[in-house]
Image (cartoon, rainbow, N blue to C red):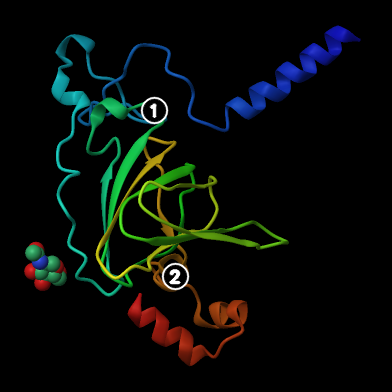
């Protein structure tokens, strides 16, 4: 009986483990973007060609350009910018916000996000899954830390008078980014208008309009 429980709990833990990026089986696996190998992540460079520059990125001190309709900018440091992140399950991101700037509701299919405010005052929130769809939100000040659990839709908004800055870490080398509005109204090709109208219980004209915007 004890053996059976042990086997069952091992099975459960294995099942859970494969839902996430596997632990590294070597010190590092610096991404080789030129490799044609198809693996979950990117193929490793030959370790003897690896240098400090592969573990390095410079530029997160630079303010982003927030002159767009949402009033925010995003500077990601994923495996695409920092090849040494390959297989390590981490990303770092800088956000800049104009006054009243927002990061529209979005989700990261592969990562939990932990955020801290470097400057300004930022309202953050996420929505729990069905059936509750509970909004959990808070106003953050400099030095405050908040977490958006993996996969849940969340947003940020600058509610201060000046520009704001935040830094996030995410638990994937490639977290993915799905904007709710962009995915629904800006898909390519567009989703059928009557389907979206029915789903959102709105007029088809509104759907056409939103599809031209996104
Ligand atoms: C910021 O972006 C806007 C819109 O794309 C552009 O017109 C402007 O020149 C940019 N500003 C800077 C400082 O790059």
Marked residue nearer the N-terminal end (1 or 2): 1
Q: Nearer the viewer, mark 1 or mark 2?
A: 2
On screen, residue 20 versus residue 90, left or right, reads right
- Quarter of the C terminus within the rendering: bottom left
Residue 107 x/y as whole percent: 47, 54
Q: Position of residue 130 (x, y in %)?
A: 69, 59
- The residue lying toward the viewer, choosing from 116 and 78, is 116
Relative to 173, residue 136 above or below:
below
Give residue 39's mark.
1
Q: Is mark 1 within 8 Å of ligand 1?
A: no
Disc 2 designates what residue?
181
Quarter where residue 46 is shown: top left
Spatial separation of the CA atoms under disc 1 and disc 2: 31 Å
User: Which residue is drawn at the image coordinates 26% and 22% (left, top)?
Assistant: 30
Q: Is mark 2 within 8 Å of ligand 1?
A: no
> Is residue 22 placed above or below 155 in the rendered structure?
above
Quadrant in which residue 140 is drawn:
bottom left
Image quadrant of ligand 1? Answer: bottom left
What residue is at 22 percent from the left and 38 percent from the top? 81
Q: How many marks?
A: 2
- Nearest the viewer among 7 and 92 is 92
**Looking at the image, which residue sits at the far right?**
1
Instruction: Tell me which residue sits at (23%, 26%) in the image.
Output: 32
């Amino acid at each position: 009986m004890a053996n059976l429980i042990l086997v069952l709990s091992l099975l459960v833990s294995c099942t859970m483990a494969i839902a996430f990026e596997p632990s590294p089986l070597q010190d590092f696996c610096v991404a080789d973007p030129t490799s044609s190998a198809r693996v979950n992540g990117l193929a490793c460079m030959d370790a003897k060609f690896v240098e400090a520059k592969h573990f390095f990125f410079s530029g997160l001190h630079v303010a982003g350009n927030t002159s767009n309709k949402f009033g925010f900018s995003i500077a990601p440091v994923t495996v695409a910018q920092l090849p040494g992140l390959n297989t390590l399950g981490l990303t770092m991101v800088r956000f800049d916000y104009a006054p009243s700037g927002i990061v529209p509701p979005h989700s990261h299919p592969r990562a939990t996000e932990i955020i801290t405010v470097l400057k300004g005052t930022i309202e953050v929130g996420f929505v729990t899954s069905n059936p509750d769809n509970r909004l959990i939100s808070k106003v953050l000040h400099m030095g405050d830390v908040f977490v958006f659990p993996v996969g849940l839709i969340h947003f940020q908004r600058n509610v201060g008078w000046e520009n704001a800055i935040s830094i996030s870490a995410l638990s994937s080398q490639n977290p993915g980014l799905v904007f709710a509005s962009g995915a629904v109204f800006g898909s390519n090709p567009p989703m059928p208008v009557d389907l979206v109208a029915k789903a959102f219980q709105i007029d088809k004209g509104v759907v056409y309009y939103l599809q031209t915007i996104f």
